[in-house]
Amino acid sequence: GENVEQHPSTLSVQEGDSAVIKCTYSDSASNYFPWYKQELGKRPQLIIDIRSNVGEKKDQRIAVTLNKTAKHFSLHITETQPEDSAVYFCAANTNTGNQFYFGTGTSLTVIP
Amino acid sequence: DAGITQSPRYKITETGRQVTLMCHQTWSHSYMFWYRQDLGHGLRLIYYSAAADITDKGEVPDGYVVSRSKTENFPLTLESATRSQTSVYFCASSESQGPQYFGPGTRLLVL
């Protein structure tokens, strides 16, 4: 099956700086890659996603890039704010069975 | 998010008891999922369902049973609860190749 690895596990940045979280996947059949933000005590919420026919997608301060050849995708957050502090999960999804395979999460802390 | 709900939100039970966690979605999504979330393990898939009456095991199915007689409901039953099943349980739903949406979660404590 698919294996998704996520790095780093923890990340601290100063407010206003950028944050980058990276994920790799193993199954070349994976073609949909969502990112979730989970605040303490809350449910994971979708923040951005990308499909395999697109190399980059941006939504205000958040962007995701995908390199199919290298099998990796990244989340970029610019101009970070304290409210960006949360745990972020990447995931990969294949056509087969519609299973989502999650990374182990990155705890992001934005220091005011 | 309001389209997927879970009950109860909090549950305390004793080892050996049967517990059922409920999940209901109003979007008519084909797929539904149960995850457990523990510190250091992220989200682990317990069971999933592609449609009514179709279910399949995920990564950690032992000790759990699911059913899906209606598209909108996907209950998860712990047949004989153990302390190792203390966790936060999330239900989710999606269409095929579509975004997955999570319920608010159920915090389960097994004493």
Image: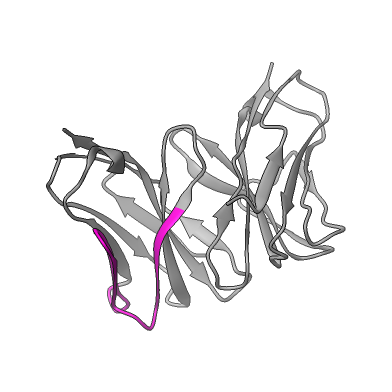
Q: Is residue B15 left or right of residue A30?
A: right
Q: Position of residue A101 (x, y in %)?
A: 50, 59
Residue under the point 43% across and 33% down: A40
Q: Is residue B104 left or right of residue B111?
A: left
Q: Main secondary structure of the magenta part?
A: strand
Q: Which residues are magenta?
A: A46-70
Q: Position of residue A34 (x, y in %)?
A: 43, 63
Residue under the point 59% across and 41% down: B104
Question: Relative to residue B18, is residue A7 depicted above or below?
Answer: below
Residue under the point 52% across and 72% down: A94
Q: Residue furthest bottom?
A: A53
A14 or B44: nearer the eye?
A14
Q: Is residue B3 magenta?
A: no
Q: Position of residue A85 (x, y in %)?
A: 30, 39
Question: Relative to residue A56, is residue A83 depicted above or below?
Answer: above
Question: Relative to residue A80, is residue A82 depicted above or below?
Answer: above
Question: Across the whole image, how many numbered discs are drawn on residues?
Answer: 0
Q: Is residue B36 left or right of residue B75?
A: left
Query: Which picture quadrant has residue A14?
Result: top left
Q: Position of residue B63 (x, y in %)?
A: 74, 38
Query: Which picture quadrant has residue B58?
Result: bottom right
Q: Is residue B94 left or right of residue A62?
A: right
Q: Residue furthest right?
A: B69
A107 or A30: nearer the eye?
A107
Query: Which picture quadrant has residue A67?
Result: bottom left
Residue under the point 82% across and 64% down: B52
